[in-house]
Amino acid sequence: MKTVSVRNLQHLLGSYLDEVERGETIIVRRRDKAIARIVAIQPEQPSPWPDLEARVQALYPDGVVSPSASDVLYEDRS
């Protein structure tokens, strides 16, 4: 872990952020007292897609709905 004063952080913020982006953790100190920790954000794991086929089976246990929504729209437009 790297330690940096508030003054140095203000003057060299870009270079310190580059270090954080590479995985370094930086402790920020004011008057020799640690006041903050800068760490890289961990990428969020995308939530898995729900089992679409199972949901369709639960909603429509008898199979395909007839007439389909597309067929109804085509009839209304005619």
Image: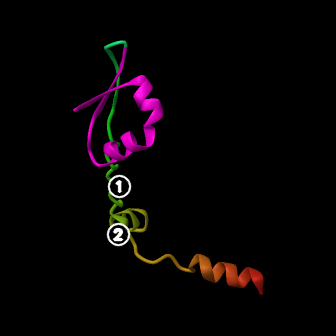
Q: Residues within 10 Å of mark 2 (few under 14, many from 20)?
A: few
Q: Tell me how far mark 1 sits from mark 2, CA to CA.
A: 20 Å
> Mark 1 or mark 2: which comes first in sequence?
1
Closest to the observer, 30 or 40: 30
Q: How crowded is mark 1: few (under 14 residues within 10 Å), some or many (20 or more)?
A: few
Q: Nearer the viewer, mark 1 or mark 2?
A: 1
Q: Where is residue 63 in the image (x, y as percent from the top left)?
A: 40, 76
Q: Position of residue 5 (x, y in %)?
A: 37, 23
> Residue drawn 50% across and 76% down?
65
Closest to the observer, 66 or 19: 19
Q: Position of residue 9 (x, y in %)?
A: 41, 31
Residue 75 relative to residue 51: left or right = right
Residue 68: say if magenta.
no
- Tell me if residue 57 comes above or below residue 36 in the rendering: below
Q: Where is residue 6 in the image (x, y as percent from the top left)?
A: 42, 24
Q: Toward which corner of the image does residue 12 lie, by quadrant?
A: top left
- The amino acid type of the residue labelled 2 equals Glu
Residue 53: which numbered mark, if any?
A: 2
What is the secondary structure assignment of the residue under circle 1?
loop
> Quick one: quadrant of the C terminus?
bottom right
According to the picture, the residue beneath numbered tag 1 turns out to be: 46
- Tell me if residue 67 comes above or below residue 32 in the rendering: below
In the image, the segment drawn in magenta is 1-30
Q: Toward which corner of the image does residue 1 lie, by quadrant?
A: top left
Query: Given contact means CB atoms under 8 Å apart, are the residues at marks 1 and 2 in contact?
Result: no
What is the secondary structure assignment of the residue under circle 2?
helix
- The amino acid type of the residue labelled 1 equals Pro
